Image (cartoon, rainbow, N blue to C red):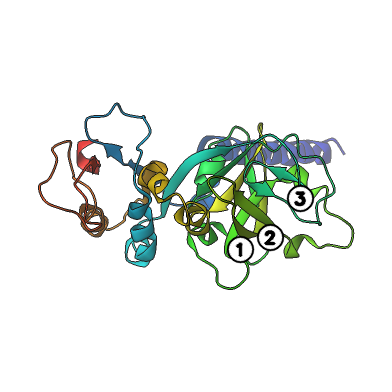
Amino acid sequence: MKKTKGRIAVFITAGIVVVAGAVLQFMLFGNKEEEGPAVHEIPIQRINITEGASLDMPYEYIRSMMNSKESLLNNAEDIEAQTIIAKRSDGIKDGIRVGYVLTEKWYNGPVDRLLYVQGITSIKTIERKDNCKVTFIDGYDSSNLMKKNGGEVGGYAILPEWMKDNIAPEYKVDNISILLMKEEPKPVLRKFKVIGFYTADTEDTVYASMYTYADLYTAFEEEALDSLITSLSIYYEDGADMSSIYSFMNDYFSDSETKKEGENKVYMDYDFFYIPVTEQ
C-alpha cells in the first residue's frame, strides 16, 4: 500500500513539473503561432519643418495615392493619412447638429460628448487613442476608409461606442448612417454609412472615410484642400519588397531632406520627404 502511494506521489510530482515547464515556456516565448510579421512605419515629413509638425499637405497627394493604392498595397501593409480636425459648432437646429455632424432619426441619445470630426484612411489613427478597440460591422474593415462608395451613401464612418447604445429600437446597427455637414461658406452635406464603433479613453470624435470627407471642402472651399492633410505614413511588414514601395513613394516625395528638382506625380514641387529604412 505504501508503494502504491509512493508511485502516485511520483506521478503527481512529474505532472506538476511538466505543467510548470509548459507555463514557463509560454511566459518566456509566448504563443509564436499567433504572432504575425512585424509592421514598420515610414513617416512622411515636410522639408525644412520640425519633425512631428503638421504637414499642411495638399489633399491631392492622398487622392492620387488612393486612386493607385493597389500597386502600393501589393507590398505595403497600409496607408495612414489624417486630416485637420473639424471642431464642434454652437447651436442645434434641424434635429441634432454638432459641428459637421447631423445625425439621423436612428439616434436617441445626447450629443454633448460628440466634439470633433476627422477624415482618415486607416483605423491606425483611431488606435492611437489610449485603450482603444475598434469593432467593425460584419462585411466591413479598415480598407473601406479609402473607398468612395457610389449612390446615395457616399462614404463610411466609425462612431464612438456610446452612440451604438442609443440606437432607436426600430433601427438595426448594420443599417444606419450619418450626415456630415460643412456649414461655411455654404452648407454642403454628405451621407456616410456607419461601419463600426470604437471604445477608448476619449470617445468624442466621428471618423469619416477620406474621399467623401474631402468632398465637403471641394464644392465651395477648395483652398482648404491645399493644407488639409496633417500627417501621412506608409506601413510595411518584414519581408516586404522595399524597392517596389520606394518606387511608388519616389513619384511623390524626395528620399532625403534634399529637395528633388522638377515636379512630382501630382505636378507639385518635392516639398515632402521620407527616410529610407537603411538610414533610420
Position of the N terminus, as image quadrant, is top right
Please provide percent x and percent y for residue 179: 66, 55
> Label 3 vs label 1: CA separation?
30 Å
- Vertical relation: 21 (above or below) 139: above
Q: Quadrant of residue 137?
A: bottom right
Q: Is residue 40 visible?
A: no
Crowding around mark 3 (Cα neighbors within 10 Å: few <14, some 14 to 19, many 20+) is few
**In the picture shown, does residue 149 fall above or below 35?**
below
The front one of 179 and 52 is 179
**Crowding at mark 2 (Cα within 10 Å: few <14, some 14-19, many 20+):** some
Viewport quadrant of the C terminus:
top left
Residue at mark 2: 137
Q: Position of residue 132 (x, y in %)?
A: 62, 39
- The answer to whether residue 77 is left or right of residue 1 is left
Residue at figure coordinates x 62%, y 52% from the top left: 180
* SS for dot 1: loop
SS state under label 3? loop
Mark-to-mark CA distance, 1 and 2: 6 Å
Front position among marks 3 and 1: 3
Query: Where in the figure is residue 127, as x and y percent of width and height?
Result: 55, 41
Residue at figure coordinates x 85%, y 48% from the top left: 108
Q: Nearer the viewer, mark 3 or mark 2?
A: 3
Disc 3 and disc 1 in contact, CB within 8 angstroms: no
Compare residues 213 and 218 and report the one nearer the observer: 218
Q: Amino acid at mark 3?
A: Asp
Task: Name the residue carrying label 3.
Answer: 94
* Amino acid type, mark 1: Tyr
Question: 171 and 1: which one is in front?
Answer: 171
Provide the residue designation for mark 1: 140
Residue drawn at 69 percent across, 56 percent down: 178
Of label 3 and label 1, which has the lower sequence position? 3
